[in-house]
Image (tube, rainbow, N blue to C red):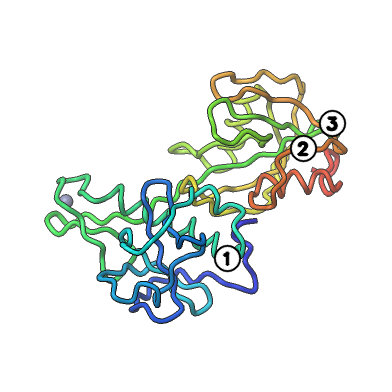
Amino acid sequence: MIQDIYPFKLHNEYLPRSPRQGDYLFAFAGNQIIVRPDETFFRYEDLAAYSSYTYLFEINSTGFFLIEEPEAAHVSLNIRQMRSFQPRHLGFAAVTAWQIYQWMNDNQYCGRCSYPMIRDKKERAMRCERCGNIVYPKISPAVIVAVINDKDQILVTKFAHSTYKNYALISGFAEIGETIEETVIREVREEAGLDVEHLHYYKCQPWSFSSTLLFGFFCRVRGSDAITMDETELKAARWADRDEEIDSLDDASLTSEMIACFRKGMVHFDEL
Ligand SMILES: [Zn+2]
């Protein structure tokens, strides 16, 4: 998955420092990341005369900083291209940085009193100096659900309104007042008209493209496996056999890993 960057390790403790040689500098414009003309990332030594740097995090001992769009020659890549970027730890750094950039960009003014916010110096937070409002990065919990029926088939779906065109699994954000298990049950019922039971937590994934923390669950159908698809959310929902080639596997996402687990025979209805 995109966050699996071993032997590299993300250090997101907020211990801001000044940039030094070898550190990476990221600039963004909307959904675009600004890179060198050869499509590699800017480093401190490329832009050492630059004015202001916002500390983001470290990977191993290399620092990552946010800067404004540089004057040096550059091109831009869509942030979605970072999903398969190599080396992977830099792609992961770029999407994680983009999440922080977006959060800062969306909180330039205080939502309580509309005064301009500042970037706090002591923690990763936006602070209003007038009313004291503090805003932390937005991380929304959501679920990815692999539903298995008694014929050992998996429920696969296609989104109705998304740039992502391949098969996916049932997914959705947690709503206010519910547990993550209740989110699983509600989303499967809403999107496919199915009841599920025997929820098994698999893994989670930080998914910065949507400021989400995804919780992956396997579960089995309870009762009928006749699908009633929510056509406002999905354009396809069907059962797939274990030996079917499913065109979503790119090893970046939790969805892909869960489908791969199913296809390798690691998940069975009777064992859920
Ligand atoms: Zn305020």
Q: Please identify the quarter of the rendering in which residue 244 is found.
A: top right
CA gap between label 2 and label 3 equals 20 Å
Labels 2 and 3: the sequence-earlier one: 3
- Which label lies toward us, 1 or 3? 1
Name the residue type under label 3. Asp
Name the residue type under label 1. His
Q: Residues within 10 Å of mark 3 (few under 14, many from 20)?
A: some
Q: Which mark is residue 246?
A: 2
* Residue in front for this viewpoint, 170 or 58: 58
Q: Is residue 113 above or below residue 47?
A: above
Q: Residues within 10 Å of mark 2 (few under 14, many from 20)?
A: some
- Which label lies toward us, 2 or 3? 2
* Residue in front for this viewpoint, 93 or 258: 93
Q: Quadrant of the N terminus?
A: bottom right
Label 1, on which residue? 89
CA gap between label 2 and label 1 equals 26 Å
Q: Could you tell me residue 61's position as x and y percent?
A: 49, 80
- Asked whether, in this view, residue 1 is left or right of residue 208, the answer is right
Q: Is residue 24 above or below residue 164?
A: below
Name the residue type under label 2. Ile
- Asked whether, in this view, residue 58 is left or right of residue 69, the answer is right
- Asked whether, in this view, residue 51 is left or right of residue 131, the answer is right
- Asked whether, in this view, residue 173 is left or right of residue 221, the answer is left
Label 3, on which residue? 150
Q: Secondary structure at mark 2?
A: loop
Q: Could you tell me residue 16's position as x and y percent?
A: 35, 75
